[in-house]
Amino acid sequence: MTIAARYEIEYLQYLGPEGALVAEPPADLADPKVLLPLFKQMLFVRTFDSKAIALQRTGKLGTYAACLGHEATHVGIGASMQPDDTFAPSYREYGAQFMRGVKPREVLLYWGGDERGNDFSGPKQDYPWCVPISTQMLYSAGAALKFKLRGEKNMAVAVCGDGGSSKTDFYAAVNSAGAYSLPLVLCVVNNGWAISVPRSAQTGAATLAQKGLAGGLHCLQVDGNDMIAVLEGMRRASERARSGEGGSVIEFMTYRLHDHTTADDARRYRDEAEVKDAWKRDPMTRLRTYLTAKGAWSEAEEAAWIEECGKRVDEEINAYLNTPVQPVEAMFDYLYADMPEDVRKQRAAALALEGRA
């Protein structure tokens, strides 16, 4: 028998669940001076997350997608990008987006039902949130092609969940990236659940990383709760992309500690013991333990920073709540260069309901 090819998927982990090193990491990435600002950003994201959920529970925000448990992956991705890169999130990568200049008030506007929240303060080449899962992966291949054709040393980064990696858009992006050797990094945040569908029910692949192999991409699986591993995985992919070696698929192993969204009740399909066990791998606790052991962080410093985060988030919440509501006709603006007659009639009817016809 002749073997045509064999493949292996490398798994990266340096910082174990107990906050101790389990493998020798790159010295620069294990430096507390590098990790401390990222940990503080994770705390900011978690503070924002909890306050956004509270807003929804009190009727001041629409359905909201929490990122609880994903902070290391999201912040690590954001820290690995350059301003001129292109980022295509799904709909919960706030940690990465805040690092790229998106304001928390814009996130709140979006989940409050105002499309102006998608007009980010961050880089204008970044894509808006994508609710139809995985379509952003193929768009990012187009952005990566632009970088290649122009000879620019930038990369496109797109994020989807484990369920999104089973979509045709994902596979099309993989094929395009491999065929044209594009500077594209496809990040799969594997949190175990595609809404209410367990990973085992939506793919038979041993890993999600290996889905990039058929396209000829570099594939890697990473402990997504380990900030050091996230940074190293992204650095490898970035170096390949910027040097013209092509694209990568990185599977980040993490867990969704909250419901899929505030409209979901995960208790209906997910065992509570599973969630309890996942909390033992919480990325926040892991990195806090490491930094504290290195003498770079203390309880007093954390208390002070959480207070500061609360003040900053409250400022953003107030800005969101005080944003004037758009007039009803705004929903018809910017849809067509020449508005069709049936849409024109709908606009007139909407104004009539307000007595402004």
Image: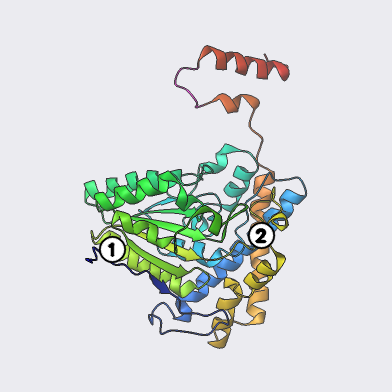
The foreground one among 202 and 53 is: 202
What secondary structure is the magenta-colored segment mainly?
loop
**Label 1, label 2: how many angstroms apart (C-alpha)?**
34 Å
How crowded pointer 2 is (Cα within 10 Å; few <14, some 14-19, many 20+) is rated as some
Q: Image point 69% across, 57% down: which residue? A: 51
Q: Is mark 1 on a helix, strand or loop?
A: helix
The foreground one among 2 and 165 is: 2
**Residue 199 location, x and y as percent?**
54, 58
Q: Is residue 218 left or right of residue 52?
A: left
Residue ID for mark 2: 258
Q: Does the magenta stretch include residue 152?
A: no
Q: In this view, does 41 lie above or below 18?
A: above
Identity of the amino acid at label 2?
His
Determine which of the numbered discs, if any, sits on residue 136 in the image.
none
Would residue 256 be seen by someone viewing this image from the given angle? yes
**Residue 313 location, x and y as percent?**
65, 58
Which residue is outermost to the front? 1
- Quarter-wise, where is residue 135 in the image? top left
Q: Is residue 272 above or below residue 149?
A: below
Q: How is the image coloured?
A: rainbow
Q: Image point 65% across, 42% down: which residue? A: 112
Q: Image point 50% across, 68% down: which residue? A: 224
Q: In this view, does 53 lie to the left or right of 10?
A: right
Q: What element carries label 2?
A: loop
- Quarter of the image where the C terminus is located: top right
Identity of the amino acid at label 1?
Arg
Would residue 125 be seen by someone viewing this image from the given angle? no
Residues drawn in magenta? 334-339
- Quarter-wise, where is residue 286 in the image? bottom right
Q: In this view, does 122 lie to the left or right of 6?
A: right
Residue ID for mark 1: 240
**Residue 348 location, x and y as percent?**
63, 15
